[in-house]
Image (spheres, rainbow, N blue to C red):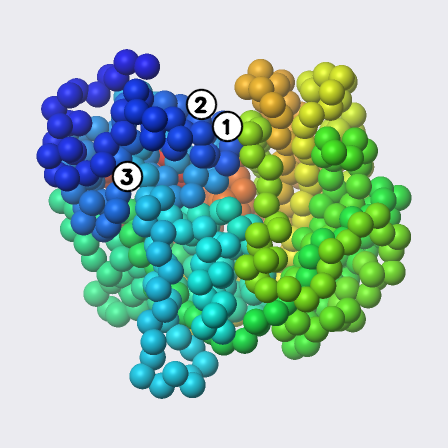
Amino acid sequence: MPSKMSLPVQDQLRQAGLEVLLPTDEGYTQRQESYFSKTASELTPACIVRARSSADVSATVRILSESDTPFAVRSGGHAPLVGSSNIGSEGVTLDLGLLNWTRVLVPTDPDQDEWQVDIGPGARWTDVYSTLEPHGLSVAGGREGGVGVGGLILGGGNTYFSASEGWACDNVLSFEIVLAPNGNIVVADGRAETADLFWALKGGGNNFGVVTNFRMRGFRGRKNVWGGLRLMPWDTREVAADALVDFTGGIKGEGNRDGNLLVFYMYRPEIPQNTVLAVFAQMAGAENAPAYEKFLGMPCLHTDVKKKSLADMVGENTMPTGYFSIWFTGTFINDSRIVKHAASLHEKLVKTLKTTVAGDDGDFWALTLFQPLPKIIATAGRGRGGNALGVEYEHDGLILQTTVMVRTAEQKVMAYPHCKKFLEDMREFASCLDGRRDGNLPWEYVNYADATQNPLKSYGEENVRRLKEVARKYDPTEVFQKLCKGGFKISDV
């Protein structure tokens, strides 16, 4: 595809010693094909810059800012939104995939419980955990092996450790970040000079600069977790809803804070019927913990639940690639009626996709996922400088993610309104539980949101005001609002 970018900008990038891939290069094609969702690779940038260090990122940001060149920033490339981690032929994609280190900083006292770990934004979570395992260390990071570090943490990051350790972003000790327009490299931490930026990066996304290193809190233990998946027949869907709500309500108990659970209502082409999938993760390694008793008593089609390393756990938990993806999200109070209604809507959605979208082969995925959002998840964050997410409610909640993956762009266009209506129907149903009680919670998880949603607004008026102040202070020329257009922008709230 012909480039719309002026040749001098490409020359400047090369003259700065940067690796620049053009559409005619084999490496360009490889990077385009490596996105999780084909939705992202629909866009074809004029060139891809592969940074190998924070200095490379600094040079790239400076050159692109000075030349007024639009750009996107890619970490793992997992976000399925058009333009979130890629850009069209008018701009440049800054690829952080080579910033993929995991480095353990050995403390002066090796017997202490907390260590420090430097992690590059392009690292994948399977590799992070595999590197930490020989040291007997873990971090509160992603639950799917192929997800990149940068996007997950900057959006908050729900983890297997959330009930005990908070969000992934709550476990960051400092962010190394490249600012615009001059490419200045600063370290944001809890000290007074950068405390505002440190807070904003914990959930504020790519509104402030390009993070080139996350220094995270490493902790000992959790060498082997007890977990895996348990696949169950569709007629368990209502019992599973009750068990999920009981599990979520019980997390506040000290003995349950090491437990994590995901419940899917699922259709996938390998099993051309609806099933229920529960994913267990007992981070202290307690086998058959009482919190999972109801699930363990249900009929089972397949299970791989056992003791395993965290690296193996997240390595097994991967989504299929090669599809066009649609994601929507909402948050609700912890009520089984809401979960059961979602199961009913899921069944209707699958029927619709089979008859009007996917054709006879049924080659699509439909996932309705619920995850616990207990009140105590905010406790760890408050104790570590706070975060921008604004998740503090008087009720335990449930995060809903509805996902549809189809083979062609045309099928995506046809499926999209049905997915959007799914969430609208959920909101309407939840708005009048018992005819009066509203079961909707206003918060939307930015890492699961569709482009038509407004997750940053859901952080609350005061947090939005603070995020805007931080953006004006550290990005005064609005490079990350106007040139780096992907993702959710605080200036649009």
Label 2 and label 3: CA atoms lie apart by 19 Å
Return the x and y of residue 382 as percentages of the image width and height.
Answer: 45, 69
Which secondary structure lies at badge 1? loop
Label 1 and label 2: CA atoms lie apart by 6 Å
Label 3 and label 1: CA atoms lie apart by 20 Å
Of the numbered discs 2 and 3, the one sitting upstream in the chain is 2
Choose top left, top right, bottom left or bottom right for residue 46.
top left
354 to 258, vertically: above or below: above
**Residue that numbered label 1 is attached to:** 38
Return the x and y of residue 401 as percentages of the image width and height.
Answer: 62, 42
Q: Is residue 321 visible?
A: yes
Choose top left, top right, bottom left or bottom right for residue 107.
bottom left
**Residue that numbered label 3 is attached to:** 50
The answer to whether the residues at label 1 and label 2 have Cβ atoms under 8 Å apart is yes
* Quadrant for the C terminus in the image: top left
Q: Disc 1 marks which amino acid?
A: Lys
**Residue that numbered label 2 is attached to:** 42
Of the numbered discs 3 and 1, the one sitting upstream in the chain is 1
173 to 89, vertically: above or below: below
Left or right: 173 as drawn, with respect to 424: left
Residue drawn at 80 percent across, 50 percent down: 302
Of residues 91 and 468, the one drawn nearer to the viewer in this rendering: 91
The answer to whether the residues at label 2 and label 3 have Cβ atoms under 8 Å apart is no
Of residues 50 and 275, the one drawn nearer to the viewer in this rendering: 50
| Eye-nearest disc, 3 or 1 | 3
Left or right: 354 as drawn, with respect to 85: right
Return the x and y of residue 183 as percentages of the image width and height.
Answer: 17, 46
